[in-house]
Amino acid sequence: MRHLYTWCGILLVVSFSVVGDVSMSRAMKQVGDLHALRQRFGIGTVVCRIFSSSTFFVAVAAMALSFFSLLFSLSWGDVSLVGPAAASLTFIGNAFAAKLFLHERVDRRRWMAAFLVAGGVALLAA
Amino acid sequence: MTFRKYLVLAGVTVFAAAGDSLLSHGMKQVGNISFHNIGSLFLAVSNPWVAFGIVLLLAFFASYMNALSWADLTYVLPASSLGYVLLALVARFALHEQVSPLRWAGIALISGGVGFVAGGPSVTHHSDTGSASSAGDIGAGSGSAGAGPGNQHHVRVATGGKP
């Protein structure tokens, strides 16, 4: 049962992380370069633009759910399993999601990077 | 890429690694949480290690939002994975823990992956809103994603001098 709870938690972490990361990336691209915005209009405008984005709140909700799923998983499984397993799967999931939903040009270089990092993280847990 | 942008990516890396470590330490003190007492997840926040971990993760969140405002998700995520390398190096050289050959291999793979994306452009697609034009629109979408310095130059031109 402990093993099942751990892996259920990991899958929840990965799913919510991917939704959160993709939504946050989309929201920030809609807002624009934060540093340039702050220099030009001030921090108030930056905050207003961020909080006027509904995608931002979707991202925050998904990340909050991912966070509580992580706490849940960590209470059942070792961090050496939960952390790397969730991170590895999130890297791969994000590469697919970024290509599908954000239309990023995920070329061979980035696929290689995603798989190398995911493999590296898995090895760290070994 | 400017020094400031590298600093933002370093913030993403360091804050995430430190925050996760503190959370892990705190949750081991809190103990197991099951579906039956799911409410205790919220009580876990009162643990000082968990609370400080959350503060560091908020700092990570700010850096992460900043990075995503000028770079692709598939660029930021591998770059931020250097935190795992950082943790392993701290474990080996500061805490004098044994790091197995497999873990060194993992570190090499992560470093290689980060090297792959670091050599390419940070943005590969058109920004899809008008708001970005006022904040340095990123017009690198038509360029090849594999293009290196040439594409980055194109980005600089499109942003009116802002790197």
Image (cartoon, rainbow, N blue to C red):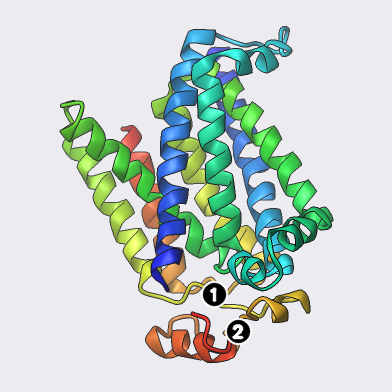
Q: Quadrant of the N terminus of chain B?
A: bottom left
Question: x and y percent of residue B19 in the render?
Answer: 47, 33
> Closest to the observer: A69 or A6?
A69
Name above or below for residue B120 compared with residue B97: below
> In whole angstroms, how far apart are the C-alphas of marks 1 and 2?
8 Å
- Earlier sequence position, callout 1 versus callout 2: 1
* Residue found 66% across the figure and 69% down from its top: A37
The residue under label 1 is which amino acid type?
Val
Quadrant housing residue A47: bottom right
10 Å crowding of disc 2: few (<14), some (14-19), many (20+): some
Question: x and y percent of residue B64 in the render?
Answer: 55, 52
A24 sits to left or right of B89 = right
A85 sits to left or right of B132 = left
The chain that hosts pointer 2 is B
The residue under label 2 is which amino acid type?
Gly
- State the SS at label 1: loop
Q: Are marks 1 and 2 in contact (CB under 8 Å)?
A: no
Q: Which residue is mark 2?
A: B141
* Residue found 20% across the figure and 26% down from its top: B95
Name above or below for residue A60 compared with residue A113: above
A82 sits to left or right of A38 = left
Quadrant housing residue B97: top left
A50 sits to left or right of B8 = right
Do the residues marked 1 and 2 share a common chain? yes
Q: Is residue A37 visible?
A: yes
Res B123 label:
1
Q: Is residue A76 visible?
A: no
The chain that hosts pointer 1 is B
Question: x and y percent of residue B123 in the render?
Answer: 54, 74
- State the SS at label 2: loop
